[in-house]
Amino acid sequence: MMQYECRILLVDDETELLQMVGKLLVKEGYKHVDRAADCGEALRQTQENEYELVLLDVMLPDGDGFTLFEQIRRIKGSRLPVIFLSARDEDHARLRGLGLGADDYITKPFLPEELLLRVKAVLKRTYNLEDETGSDRIGKALVDWGAGTICVDGEDYMLTAKEFMLLKKLCENRGRILSMNVLCDTLWPDGSYGYENSLMVHIRHLREKLEDNPSRPEHLLTVRGLGYKLK
């Protein structure tokens, strides 16, 4: 079971497969699994939400997954991993999918164990979260990097992948001011322009897990006009 929270978008027009894969991922420990049955809904959800992984069918009722993949990459950049799902096993389809920059390609029908192993491998390769060890103390909060959790007064709070990356960067530069540009580049290395508001949302969520009073933080501080600093 994964030890950190990931939000996954599952895009497929087969209702039974949507339900089966969704339940499989939730049972494995992925708590946030959104579903879309066509390109339009998938594009809307991608624009509105932050995802750590997209599972994408090639054939959709209002378009094809390859075109949707390119649209998603234009919006989110190449840092967002995508795994294609398809009933087509022709070499040209597989090569086209991987040639666009997709992270993996799974042919239907597939074994549940195969899907879970592929998902886990792509997440590990992209975010390198499971290889982290050790801990850091931030006030009353204990950050367990191996588990991807923040423990405060005996209660564990799971870190999302973006929160993990952000907090790790701040801890590695503890006591130093990091500009918004530096932090945005950490989370969105393929192009961080325009992500300042998203960064502030992640900062707020971290404060809610770290601070006694998130509106008056004592540890994760805003340095007006310069950026953020972790004490």
Image (cartoon, helix red, strand yellow):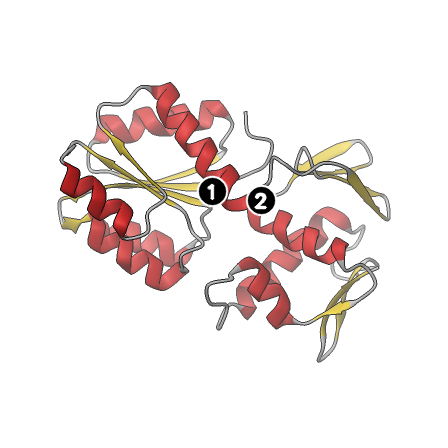
Number of marks present in the image shown: 2
Would residue 162 appear left or right of 137 to someone viewing this image? Answer: left
Q: Is residue 27 visible?
A: yes
Question: Where residue 198 sits in the image (x, y, percent)?
Answer: 54, 63
Indicate the secondary structure of the residue bearing disc 2.
Answer: loop
* Residue 8 position by quadrant: top left
Indicate the secondary structure of the residue bearing disc 1.
Answer: strand
Q: Which mark is residue 177?
A: none
N-terminal of the two: label 1 or label 2? 1
| Residue linked to disc 1 | 7
Which quadrant of the figure contains the N terminus?
top right
Residue closest to the far bottom: 225
Residue at image x 15%, y 42%?
Answer: 92
C-alpha span from label 1 to label 2 = 8 Å
Question: Local crowd at mark 1 within 10 Å, few (<14), some, or many (≥20)?
Answer: some
Query: As displayed, is residue 179 above or below residue 18?
Result: below
Q: Which mark is residue 160?
A: 2
Residue at image x 32%, y 47%?
Answer: 102
Q: Is residue 142 visible?
A: no
Residue type, mark 2 in image: Thr
Question: Where residue 15 sits in the image (x, y, percent)?
Answer: 22, 30
Would residue 199 appear left or right of 143 to someone viewing this image? Answer: left
Residue type, mark 1 in image: Arg
Give 140 or 63, whichever is nearer the viewer: 63
Which quadrant of the figure contains the C terminus?
bottom right
